[in-house]
Amino acid sequence: MDVSALALGIACLGVSVGEGLLVASYLSSTARQPELQSKLMTGVFMGVAFIEGTFFVTLAMTLFLRG
């Protein structure tokens, strides 16, 4: 069995959970203090970028180690 497919599946699961938690926290914070929405949005974009970056590093390493 090829474990690279399993690694990518786990990475996708982690990315989905991480982004879901990030967006849920953003919505909760915005509901409590709407005036901070623009400052919070910057953090959301940074968080999504780092989470997606982690996935792409996992993808690259999986493809690199596989071949």
Image: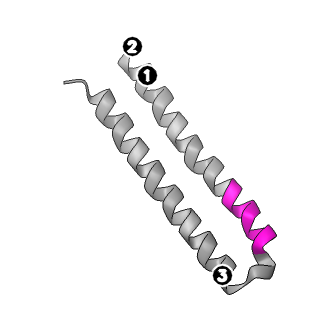
Q: Quadrant of residue 7?
A: top left
Q: Quadrant of residue 36?
A: bottom right
Residue 63, label in figure: 1
CA distance separating discs 3 and 2: 48 Å
Q: Is residue 56 magenta?
A: no
Left or right of residue 26, residue 11 in this image: left
How many numbered marks does the figure carry? 3
Left or right of residue 28, residue 7 in this image: left
Look at 44% across and 57% down and name the residue there: 17
Q: Which residue position is annotated with label 2?
A: 67
60 in relation to 42, above or below: above
Q: Decide which of 44, 64 is in the foreground and name it.
A: 44
Which comes sooner in the sequence, label 3 or label 2? Answer: 3
Tag 2 near tag 1, CB within 8 Å? yes
Which comes sooner in the sequence, label 1 or label 3? Answer: 3
Q: What element does badge 2 sit on? A: loop
CA distance separating discs 2 and 1: 6 Å
Q: Which residue position is annotated with label 3?
A: 31
Q: Which residues are magenta?
A: 37-45
Q: How dense is the environment of label 3, judged by Cα within 10 Å: few (below 14), some, or many (20 and up)?
A: few
Q: Nearer the viewer, mark 3 or mark 2?
A: 3
Look at 43% across and 22% down and name the residue there: 63
Residue 3 place in picture, x, y as percent: 27, 29
Report the amino acid beneath label 3: Ala
Q: What element does badge 3 sit on? A: helix
Direction left: furthest residue? 1
Residue 36, label in figure: none
Residue 24 place in picture, x, y as percent: 54, 69
